[in-house]
Image (tube, rainbow, N blue to C red):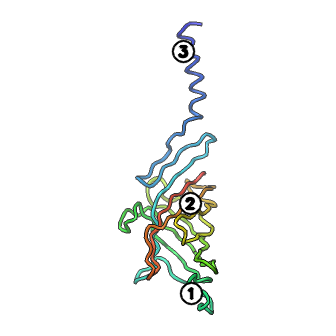
Amino acid sequence: MSKQNAMVVMMLVLSVILPSRIQSLKFKAGNWGKSFVKENQETETNLQFYFHDTISGKNPSAVKVAEPVDNTKSFVTQFGSIWMADDPLTETSDPKSKLVGRAQGIYASSGQQEPGLLMSLSYSFVDGPYNGSTFALVGKNSVMNPVREMPVVGGTGLFRMAKGYAIAKTHWFDMTTGDAIVGYNVTLVH
């Protein structure tokens, strides 16, 4: 076999083997999102954004819609209280930074002994290639832990049939008002 034919055969073999080993970038959204096509043709998307939960002031993004009849027993944990949320999601921790989406839904205080929330929120995006796409997060949020992991259970648009997880880290919390800024790092497979 000539050197030229051997080189052609080697190039053909490499062109079949290598692409399955390399992840290719599919989408990029500023500094807050990247999507990669994986070996099995699923796409993996990594998102990093900030969740701004404001329950105080004239224009709160979350409001308490229910609380237990006897709330004296659950003062610290607010067990039984329920909030509706329409929280902004931004590119950085600065509330005035670029809006990338909104977290809309409900969260409820589900811990009797320690503060903890049951989260049921839809994260809807309004920026870049993810505009119009959503993912759903449903699970326990142990808010006093510095790092929390919560499950992603579905999605729409580019995130249709998504599964994955969200890592949440409290960036800022005001003990007096209950307002918080939480950093999210989300991994989706769809």
| Occupied quadrant, residue 140 | bottom right
Report the Cα–Cα distance between label 1 and label 3: 74 Å
Relative to 132, is 60 above or below?
below
Pinpoint residue 79: horizontal percent, then vertical percent.
Answer: 61, 82
- Amino acid type, callout 2: Ala
Name the front one of labels 1 and 3. Answer: 1
Which residue extends farthest top? 2
In which quadrant will I find the N terminus?
top right
Task: Give the structural element (helix, strand or loop) at label 1.
Answer: loop
Pinpoint residue 184: horizontal percent, then vertical percent.
Answer: 50, 61
How many residues crowd mark 1 within 10 Å: few (<14), some (14–19), many (20+)? few
- Amino acid type, callout 1: Phe
* Residue at x 35% of width, y 67% of height: 96
Q: Which residue is mark 1?
A: 75
Decide which of 151, 86 is in the foreground and name it.
151
Decide which of 64, 127 is in the foreground and name it.
64
- Amino acid type, callout 3: Met
* Residue at x 56% of width, y 56% of height: 157
Q: Are marks 1 and 3 in contact (CB under 8 Å)?
A: no
Q: Give the number of the disc on residue 50.
A: none
Q: Which residue is mark 3?
A: 7
32 relative to 113 in the view: left or right: left
How many residues crowd mark 2 within 10 Å: few (<14), some (14–19), many (20+)? many
Report the Cα–Cα distance between label 2 and label 1: 28 Å
Decide which of 164, 86 is in the foreground and name it.
164
Pinpoint residue 45: horizontal percent, then vertical percent.
Answer: 53, 51
Q: Are marks 3 and 2 in contact (CB under 8 Å)?
A: no
Task: Give the structural element (helix, strand or loop) at label 3.
Answer: helix
| Occupied quadrant, residue 69 | bottom right
Relative to 69, is 163 above or below?
above
Q: Which residue is mark 2?
A: 166
Task: Give the structural element (helix, strand or loop) at label 2.
Answer: strand
